[in-house]
Amino acid sequence: SSAPTSVAFLGNYTGDSFSDAIEYHLIAQEISSIASFREVAGADGDTAQQRARDFLVLLDFLPTSVNDEDEDDIVGGEDEEGGNGKMRQLRNSGRAYLKTSTPAYRVVQRFVIATLYFATNGTQWINSDFWLEPGVHECEWLGIQCQEISIPSVSLSEVLKNPDKIPTDENGDVPMTTELMVIEINLPENNLGGFLPQEIMALPYLQMLGLWSNDISGTLPTQMGKLVNLKSVHLEDNLFSGGIPTEIGMWTKIEDLSFSGNGDLEGGIPTEIGYLSNLERLWISDTQLIGPIPTEIGNLVLLGELNLSNNNLNSTLPEEIENILPLEWLDLTSNSLTGEIPESWGSLASLKNFEVGDNELEGELPDFFERFPYLESASFHENIFIGDIPSSIGSAGASLRKLTLGENRFEGELPETLKDCINLERLDLGTNQLKGEIPSWIGDMEKLVFLDLSDNRFSGSVPPELSNLRNLRELRLAENLLVGTVPCGSLETATFLSADCENSVVECTCCTECM
């Protein structure tokens, strides 16, 4: 292979210091940019890369107990930048934790983890136990998990002689050694800020990256695609911006991926998502993503959860989702999706959550609900669905706990199969064109907490069986053609109850709002 272009730019390595060796190697291998080391310190001080290098060179020494030094030579910690006299004494004594004779993989690993600390404002973390403790293995730092792995034993100084021929663990003819290598970084809810440095790509054995619920901003580094052993990435609830790198298509081992809750994340869902054939969970909700749901998503045949809610996606629903047979959780709520729900989605027999509310979907709702025996939650509200409510809508029976069909153009009477849904807790049928009498069997749904029948064409008397709904907290009956008396009874404990009682069309002594 040919040397990276940065090697030609730098010329041959001629330095003899550990500092020069680190810098040259990182730039030569395009782990760090030249600018990150050449940048002149500004108001914010040195770059994260400069500070990480200086930590390894000026601060990172073996503890006195290992060196058999006098107690007076214990490393002090009051000078973070390395100006302490004891630091210099230990450095000059040759007791550095890492050296040019250390395996290059280990030097890079410690540098990368230190860079992560400085890039994400480590001094502001809630908990940073053991981080940047001189002579303490990075695998003992809070949130870092390691595993003994066989790596090339080639030292940093040896690598510098042939920077364009770095041996890997795939080369069977190179000497190997066993080292503790980073496989997990877990620092959630820890007040990380700043940015995610590109250097993270140089942790080749990383399997888990968990940085959720922090304040990390900036773009997602495209270099992250090189982390081909990743199985789980949780970056949700941060401040990332820009697009999702197409390079994530290289994460072919990944099983769990979440970018949700990054409100400035924009652009489209890369079609390369289809290469993640081992993915079991994909959450990219609450962002500014726009464009289509790629048809390639149908290649994710092991997917159990797909959450793309609260974005700006604006395509039709891809039929290819029919291939994701293990899918249990499908949430596409609050986008601008158009067209009809594909009949072929009836193949998703494992569905428990079917959420497509608050979109621009249209046509008739497919009558395929008998194919979803485990359905627990179904949301179709705020669309442009027409026609009768499918007769199979209640086929899940006692499994169904939430059904929202409000703010559509459904017509006709309520299907009889709904009476089997005795465990419903939320039933929203408001703002449609439904007609007929309110069936008495609704009174058997004793777990109902929310019931909206308002703004329809229901007629006749309010069934007295509604008084059986002891858990009801909100009942909406207004804007219908009902007459008679609302059976208050246990309904008096509801916090909101509306009916057409303003002009005595309906009598209601327990209503909180009369229309």
Image (cartoon, helix red, strand yellow):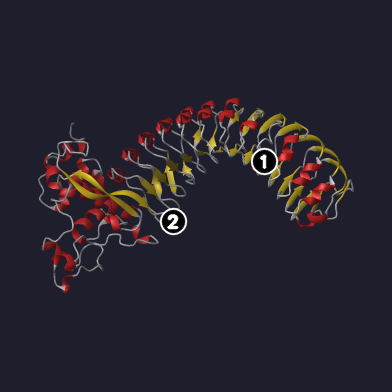
Q: Quadrant of residue 134?
A: bottom left
Task: Report which residue position mark 2 lands on.
Answer: 189
Circle 2 — which element?
Answer: loop
Q: Earlier in the sequence, mark 1 or mark 2?
A: 2
C-alpha span from label 1 to label 2: 34 Å
Which of the two residues, 186 or 515, is positioned nearer the viewer here? 186
x, y percent for residue 107: 21, 50
Q: Circle 1: is it few (<14), some (14-19), or many (20+) Cα within 10 Å?
A: many
Q: Nearer the viewer, mark 1 or mark 2?
A: 1
Q: Is residue 186 left or right of residue 492?
A: left
Q: Amino acid at mark 2?
A: Glu
- Which residue is found at the position 13% from the left and 68% from the top? 68
Q: Which of the two residues, 511 or 306, is positioned nearer the viewer here?
A: 306
> How many neighbours does mark 2 have within 10 angstroms: few (below 14), some (14-19), or many (20 or more)?
some
Residue extending furthest bottom? 72
> Which residue corresponds to the image point at 25% horizontal and 55% vertical from the top-left?
51
The spot of residue 492 in percent (x, y) is: 79, 57
Marking on residue 403: 1
Res. 47 in view? no
| Residue at figure coordinates x 44%, y 48% from the top left | 239
Q: Residue at x 44, y 56 (%)?
A: 189
Mark 1 vs 2: CB contact within 8 A: no
**Residue 206 versus residue 70 in the image, above or below:** above
| Badge 1 amino acid | Leu
Q: In the image, 335: left or right of 111? A: right
**Residue 147 circle label:** none
